[in-house]
Image (cartoon, rainbow, N blue to C red):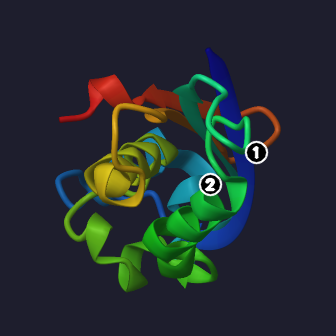
Amino acid sequence: MFRLTRRYRFSASHRLHSPLLSEAENARIYGKCNNPYGHGHNYILHVSALGPAGGADGRVLNPRMLDDFVAREILDRLDHQNLNCDVEWFEGRVPTSENLGMEICRRLKRGWKNAFPGEWPRFEKVCIEETARNIFEIDADEIA
């Protein structure tokens, strides 16, 4: 078995602020990330698939097909967007990197079988690098 991981980049802004908390609680919990004007990140997204190398091309999957799938499902919707205002995925939710990773994983998992029919390759996980020190990973099996 091989794991193929492709790396993608996108830029987006957000404000970490929960409507369920007071202004003081938001400021205490989220600190500078609660800035009313928001802030941005140059995110790095890793998408991993698992499968045997085989077939006529000897690959786990065609990387170009994965690139097209990730662009259509994720990058085209998130790149240069304000996650709070421009992305319906976060309506009523705080766009933390954990929630971002969960939504990306959910959407890739939902469309995977249409894009890659058959038993292999299997969608394995996503990893979001918000900063060089803040990295979040979620396995596809953890998402319903």
Judge whether 67 appears above or below 136 on screen. below
Relative to 60, residue 41 above or below: below
Amino acid carrying label 1: it is Thr
Eyeballing the image, is 124 above or below 94? above
Mark 1 neighbour class, 10 Å CA radius: few under 14, some 14 to 19, many 20 or more: few
Image depth: mark 2 or mark 1 in front: 1
Q: Quadrant of the N terminus?
A: top right
Q: Quick one: label 2, few (<14), some, or many (20+) residues within 10 Å? A: some
Quadrant where the C terminus is found in the figure: top left
Residue that badge 1 annotates: 131
Hey, which quadrant is residue 84 in on the image?
Answer: bottom left
**What is the secondary structure assignment of the residue under circle 2?**
helix
Secondary structure category for the residue under label 1: loop
> Where residue 69 sits: x, y (%)?
51, 65
Is residue 139 rendered to the left or right of residue 93? Answer: right
Check disc 2 and report the residue beneath it.
Answer: 32
In this picture, is 20 found above or below 48? below
Judge by depth and name the residue closer to the eye, 53 or 28.
53
Is 78 displayed left or right of 114 in the figure?
right
Q: Nearer the viewer, residue 74 or 128?
A: 74
Q: Amino acid at mark 2?
A: Lys
Residue 42 visible in image:
no
In this rendering, position of residue 22 left or right of residue 115:
left
Q: Determine the residue located farthest toward the front in the rendered image.
A: 56
* Coordinates of residue 50 in the picture (x, y in percent): 55, 26
Image position, residue 118 (x, y; %): 34, 40
Instruction: Residue at the far top: name it.
Output: 1
Circle on res. 117: none
Distance from Cα at disc 2 to Cα at disc 1: 15 Å
